[in-house]
Amino acid sequence: MSNTTVREFIRNYENGTYSSPRMRTMIEAGWCDWFCEDEELKPRLDAMFQKVKQIAMSSKIDMDRMYVYFKNNCLMEGGTYDDFRFCDIPGNSLVYTITLASGHRKTAGQSEVWGKENDFKEALAKGTWDDIENFFKPEEKNTNKLTLEKALAKRNEARSRRRSFDDDDYETPKGLLNAEYDWGFWDAVITIMKNCGMKELDAKAVL
């Protein structure tokens, strides 16, 4: 089973590392057990990747100390269904199991999240996928968030300030240098956020 961090998994997927449907590639992507046909693993991975990415930015998920793996489950009574699971890399302990659509008869089609917060005794959240997303939404305690949109606006502002100077304007070198620095700085922040699939981060991390 792969213990690639969640952040690395997302980056690898978006870079095409798991684009091949070969079994070896699917195992590297995180598949550990399945009862479906081997050729179904890639489309099932594609569907679950979107869900993983949607909740990976949650404060409940440590993208650098957790890994994610995938299972296709077969029940004695009921249908097969997929889930993905987040584990702590230190200690290799299971933290969350997320079911997209339950195969159990009583909860058929229901999305669920189970976790160590209550020792997996009952679902922490259930219903539709929106209910799962809401469970993983970051707490609104810290309003000092830098979103990708804000970073883009700051880069545009720095770019406009830089263009207000003439290339041969030596009377205000400090202002010119500051504008060029800010432009480069925000361009780097945006590149990092995009490469890591980050929609927001704590502004204190960069300011």
Image (tube, rainbow, N blue to C red):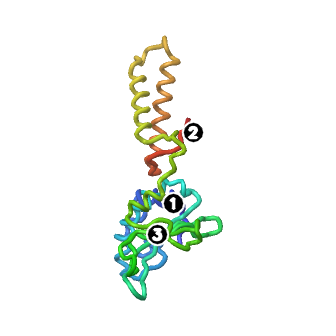
Amino acid, disc 3: Phe
Q: Which of 204 and 67 is in front in this view?
A: 204
Q: Mark 3 points at which residue?
A: 84
Q: Mark 1 points at which residue?
A: 6
Question: Is 165 located above or below residue 34 in the figure?
Answer: above
- Expressed as whole percent of the image width and height from the top left, the position of residue 187 reads 45, 37
Q: Residues within 10 Å of mark 2 (few under 14, many from 20)?
A: few
The residue mark sitting in front, 2 or 1, is: 2
Q: Name the residue under label 2.
A: 204
Label 1 SS: helix
Label 3 SS: strand
How far apart in space, not on screen, are marks 2 and 1 (Cα)?
A: 22 Å
How far apart in space, not on screen, are marks 1 and 3 (Cα)?
A: 12 Å
Which quadrant of the view contains residue 191? Answer: top left
Visible residue check, residue 122? yes
- Expressed as whole percent of the image width and height from the top left, the position of residue 18 reads 41, 65
Amino acid, disc 1: Val
How far apart in space, not on screen, are marks 3 and 2 (Cα)?
A: 32 Å
Label 2 SS: helix
The circle on residue 116 is none
Query: Looking at the image, which residue sits at the far top?
Result: 171
